[in-house]
Image (spheres, rainbow, N blue to C red):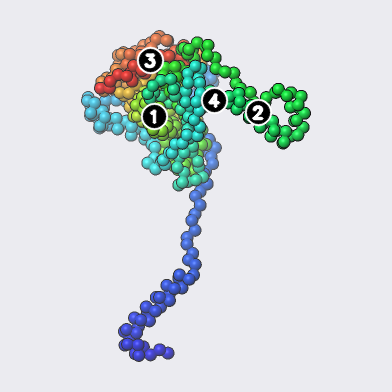
Amino acid sequence: MINLLHLGGATGAIARVKQAATALTLLLCLALPVALPAQADPPEPVTLTDEEARADMLRKLGITQLRPGPSGDPAAPNAANYDEALANPCPDLPPVFETTSGEPVTTPDKWWDVRRPELVSLFEQEVYGRVPDRVPSVTWTTKVEDREYVGRIPVVAKQLIGHVDNSSYPAIEVDIEMMLVVPTNVSGPVPVLMMFGRPEFPAPAQPNKEDLEVLNTAFKEMLIEARPDTREIFDRYPAYTPITRLPPANWFAPPPNGDSPTTEQLLAAGWGYATISPASIQADNAAGLTRGIIGLVNRGQPRSSEDWGALRAWAWGAARGLDYLETDSLVDARRVGIEGVSRYGKAALVTMAFEPRFAVALLGSSGKGGVTLHRRVFGEAVESLAGWGSYWMGGNYVKYGAEQSTFGKLTGCDLPVDAHMMLALCASRHVFVSYGIPEQGDAKWLDQRGSYMATVAAGKVYRLLGAADLGVTDDYLNEAMPPVNTGLLDGNLAWRQHDGGHTDQPNIQHFIPWANRVLAAKPE
């Protein structure tokens, strides 16, 4: 036994023993492996059917009974209403020039500083949902760049991929697909119309005769090596070439006119175009809400009632596409427009309203959730969007189709905002509202008159901000729609109903000169 008194006194001895014990413990810790807490794998994305996704939102909102949407079949018991006498159960629209506290809005400053931010917040809360603060960044790369001819117009076509950073949740990948096509027979950067649709090369360049011969020789050799029995076939047809050129461009074809495809009319007018794929951003169904950009941000879990829907997600993707266009020297980023038809017309309006960098919009046959007034009961109804179309909208929008719930019954008349206010959020930028006619397939379901009413009602905001509206009265209830093929195209807000179907192509020949004029005008 150690005699502590011989180590320099009791107190000093005890201190030195403690130091020795601490050093021994440290050495043992360094020598032995240390067990660290296991890193938990991120959860797999939840997989729901469309019905399960809708039921989950009803449960979160406390809704026990949802009113069914109307049927498009006129013989059905719940056929949609097409009687104008019954179409306006609440004809007074929410006041666009009155703040939530009841103060009047009479100056542009009051609009920009108070009323517009209020409307943005209300639409995010009650209609389209809010884009989360934690949305990851997007990195754009050019996958393929090709020099092509569209008709007689030389173009450069770029296949672009916008990769969304998914390092926080690798189980979901989002790669935004976009095609940019710009004419090369014009000088300087060009205006571009971004369109929701399927990106494709317009006219892929083909190998010349010599290169094609090399490819055919290599192809024959590989095929004979893999299938020796094919040698006999090639011997019987020695002049046959498996790979042939497509028919050459018709250099004698007339120049594009109003009947030509939209893309050809744009290129002939010195515009470029970009086609962006909505499906590469967010799926067009309720089951997809745990995938795509919404699912990535939510780590594969079902969305909350505050979360954005597909329309807002597609609009977010279009804004990220504009991020790229701002970096491309071929594009005049100050003159980029957004276009869409039907559900993509809805998305184009959402894009224009929430992303102020877009200068012009062409909104085709957008219906409810687009330019048509929500509180109108004509064709497509609030109940339609609150039911099968709920994934387009923010979660809270479903409340306005509730028949029984913890908060009672709500209808479209209870909405604090409406479509005229979405158009007002676009002011004083340039918006062209386009529709066809029911006789050609642009169904009454879309409520063309309800869209015209909203466009009329938005006019006063354009005038307040020093821009021109449709040039009609503010009496949205009684103002007569212009005859078909008679456009109201003198202002920054425009309307035209063509005699075609569910498309905006017949209006492109009117949109382009209108857009050239309003974009060239010096802003106030």
Q: Is residue 96 above or below residue 441?
A: below
Instruction: Report the front residue among 30 and 407.
Output: 30
Mark 3, mark 4: which one is toward the viewer? 4
Looking at the image, tell me whether mark 1 or mark 4 is earlier in sequence order: 4
Looking at the rendered structure, the secondary structure element under dot 2 is helix
Q: Which mark is residue 216?
A: 2
Q: Is residue 127 visible?
A: no
- List x then y, in percent, for residue 264: 47, 18
Looking at the rendered structure, the secondary structure element under dot 3 is helix
Instruction: Report the front residue among 490 and 90.
Output: 490
Label 4 to label 2, Cα distance in Å?
19 Å
* Rendered residue at 74%/27% (across/down): 234
Looking at the image, tell me whether mark 4 or mark 2 is earlier in sequence order: 4
Label 3 to label 4, Cα distance in Å?
29 Å
Q: In the rendered view, does 379 fall on the left or right side of 490?
A: right
* Rendered residue at 40%/31% (across/down): 328
Q: Which mark is residue 329?
A: 1
- List x then y, in percent, for residue 23: 40, 75
Mark 4, mark 2: which one is toward the viewer? 2
Amino acid of disc 1: Ser
* Rendered residue at 54%/41% (across/down): 47
Amino acid of disc 4: Pro
* Rendered residue at 39%/10% (across/down): 486
Looking at the image, tell me whether mark 3 or mark 1 is earlier in sequence order: 1
Write down the residue under mark 3: 513
Q: Is residue 20 above or below residue 453?
A: below
Mark 3, mark 1: which one is toward the viewer? 1
Amino acid of disc 3: Pro
Write down the residue under mark 4: 204
Label 3 to label 1, Cα distance in Å?
24 Å
Label 1 to label 4, Cα distance in Å?
22 Å
Looking at the rendered structure, the secondary structure element under dot 1 is loop
